[in-house]
Amino acid sequence: MPVLFRLLAHIPLRAVHFLGGGLGWLAFLASPTYRRRFLANAALAGYRFADVRPAVAQAGRTVAEIPRLWFGEAPHCTLQNEALVAQAYAAGRGVIYLTPHLGCFELSARDAARRWGAVYGPITVLYRPARQAWLARLMETARNRPAMHAVPTTLSGVRQMIKALRRGEAVGLLPDQVPPSGLGVWAPFFGQDAYTMTLAARLAQQTGAQVVLAFCERLPRGRGFVTHFQRLEEPLAHDATQAAAQINAAMERLIRQCPEQYLWGYARYKRPRAEAVPQAAVAGGAA
């Protein structure tokens, strides 16, 4: 399998996107569970299937791009609003990049690392190791590269992120990823309570780091990508639940800018084991 990954890394991006689009539709049509979740999550956000139909193919492209992003030549990516990032670094307390499962989220941290890593140090990104040993080794190899350091979702990984921020470096997180039980709070996401990580807010509060919102938009016909950088609209509250709700609202705003590239099939509303579901979530149903 690792050999296959390296071979796929050399396919032109336009062909990758064509094949990935077919893969996305195959998954959508073949899996009733995935299809129901996709449609239910989109409906919670107020979208009809016609509004987010392109997201079916885009989900497949997200998967198909992985070999190219891990082992191939870096695709062309334009950075929008670079001045905002420069200002965040200039504060000297580190930068926290927050991006949802939107567009090519794998590339957003890599391209930021390539642009600013040589000057301000590497970006430390949090990832969940794969259960398969061969894939776990592959992920570790692919994600640890010059100007980018990947750490697992463990206490050790969190400590490394805090140290990086205190050195004035950057870290990257997917705050719409469901955390393990005990490491999150229930907060609204598109109007329904979702178990939400508190790590992003805690990192900002403990270090004074600047929060930068980001998402990497996939351009049509394999023309590359555009990474958009934006400000968090207001300071994060000290209360963990309020801060999580603020971050969820910020992720919603990003997603609404490009809903056709969000992973609507992601199990955002799943309940971690041993975690009680709030009554509001029970009343509203689960996606």
Image (cartoon, rainbow, N blue to C red):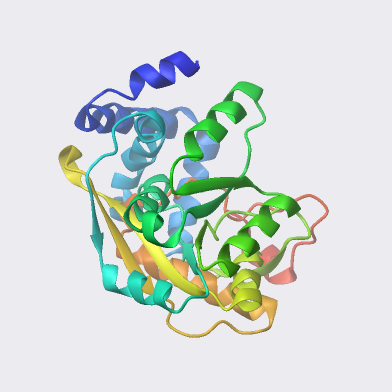
Extreme residue toward the right, this view: 274
Answer left or right for 237 relative to 121. Answer: right
Q: Which of the two residues, 116 or 21, is positioned nearer the viewer here?
A: 116
Residue at 50% across / 63% down in the picture?
A: 169
Q: Position of residue 199 (x, y in %)?
A: 65, 65
* Residue 59, quarter of the rendered image: top left
Instruction: Tell me if residue 266 comes above or below residue 193 in the rendering.
Output: above
Q: Position of residue 230 (x, y in %)?
A: 35, 72
Q: Which of the two residues, 147 or 135, is positioned nearer the viewer here?
A: 147
Q: Position of residue 183 (x, y in %)?
A: 73, 61
Residue at 63% across / 78% down in the picture?
A: 205
Answer left or right for 76 relative to 163. Answer: left
Instruction: Tell me if residue 137 comes above or below residue 227 in the rendering.
Output: above
Q: Position of residue 142 (x, y in %)?
A: 48, 33
Q: Is residue 195 visible?
A: no
* Residue 176, quarter of the rendered image: bottom right
Extreme residue toward the front, this view: 119
Q: Is residue 234 visible?
A: yes
* Residue 70, quarter of the rendered image: top left
Residue at 37% across / 33% down in the picture?
A: 24
